Image (spheres, grey):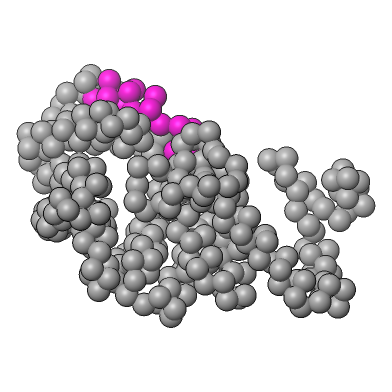
Amino acid sequence: MLAEAVDVQLLEPLPDGRHRFRPEIRRYLADTAGPVHGIAGCSAAVTRVLDALLNRALHAAHAALPQSWRTEPAPESGVVCRDEADGVAVLAAEVRNVVRAVSVAEEYQHIDTALRLARALWPLQLKAGYWDDVLPALRLAARCADEHRPDSRMTGALHFQLAHCLGELGREEEADRAAGAAVACERAAGHTRGEASSVELQGLLSMWRWLYASAHQRFVEAESIYRGITSGQDEAVDLPRALALVQRHQGRALRGMGRLAESRVLLEAATAFFEEQGEAYNQARALTDLAEALHDAGENAEALTKITLAERLLTPAATPHLMYLAGLRLRCEAVA
């Protein structure tokens, strides 16, 4: 049936083996659906598609980043992704649909669905980039959250994602504003973990501009906020991982400040933690940072060993990080 629809130009095939309606066909169907099926029928159809896509996105996001509190638990129903690589691959395949669905959900006033769909994009932007692709959905979701869920954890999370995306795209002033909004929302919501993480992001934004001393100050502040979480709080379960992440970033900032010995201590500890936890992605990122510190210290042979291990731990979907490692390898080989 799909082949026949392509033959008569109702559908057009996509490179990944999937199909989409041709634009003029989509417009025609939209115009005629109301008179044929009625408003209630059309609304129900939209809801079914949004719910199905949200289910798929939540499964994929949880599989892609299972250790993070920024991803929801996987739904009880639906198709389970095999592993982290499969989760990222599903999000990458569905990213256009998810971005469009955020807009449709907002238009039909399915506010929670719009916000949850946008939040499910976090593992994709973190691990595989796609910043240009997800930016429109994050802008819309953050505005929608400000309007309908002010000063909530969800609003803080979406401003965090928006700030991260803008920072990766080099839009510094916008990123700073979004990160500041994330801190304010999380603080207003009484979400200590979210506030600390957002302060940590402010440090990353400074570090991406080579403002290492300022970045280190933010990371130390974030650690202090994290340590305000007590053992009896729900957030305490994430504390060891959060501290390992923020100490890894402190190590990166110290390397930029030329304090290589201190940097290596923190980066080696972070690498060991993520290896023990079985977090291949974060172990690879910590190994990358450690390789940079070794390169700065002139220990290029050892740095190349760390690079090789990091490359093996990353999946092919981690394109930005693999490209960075390739550049770092060239730098090390040039002087090794």
Q: Which residue is drawn at 80% across and 51% down?
A: 12
Residue 75 versus residue 204: which sits nearer the camera? 75
Q: Residue at x 23, y 25 (%)?
A: 303
Q: Is residue 313 magenta?
A: yes
| Secondary structure character of the magenta stretch overall | helix
- Residue 57, horizontal then vertical, whole percent: 54, 51
- Residue 209, horizontal then vertical, whole percent: 25, 56
Residue 114 versus residue 285: which sits nearer the camera? 114
- Residue 192, horizontal then vertical, whole percent: 21, 61
Magenta segment, which residues?
A: 303-318
Can residue 260 be spotted in the picture?
A: no
Can residue 18 be spotted in the picture?
A: yes
In this picture, residue 77 sits left or right of residue 304: right
Q: Residue at x 75, y 71 (%)?
A: 42
Q: In which quarter of the image is the N terminus?
A: top right
- Residue 202, horizontal then vertical, whole percent: 24, 60
Q: Residue at x 57, y 56 (%)?
A: 54
In this picture, residue 102 sits left or right of residue 7: left
Q: Residue furthest bottom?
A: 147
In this picture, residue 210 sits left or right of residue 169: left
Residue 102, relative to residue 200: is it above or below?
below
Task: Kindly indicate the quadrant of the structure image that contains residue 163.
Answer: bottom left
Task: Kindly indicate the quadrant of the structure image that contains residue 26.
Answer: bottom right
Residue 146, relative to residue 283: is it above or below?
below
Say how many tags the image has: 0
Q: Quadrant of the C terminus?
A: top left
Residue 95 versus residue 168: which sits nearer the camera? 95
Q: Is residue 192 magenta?
A: no
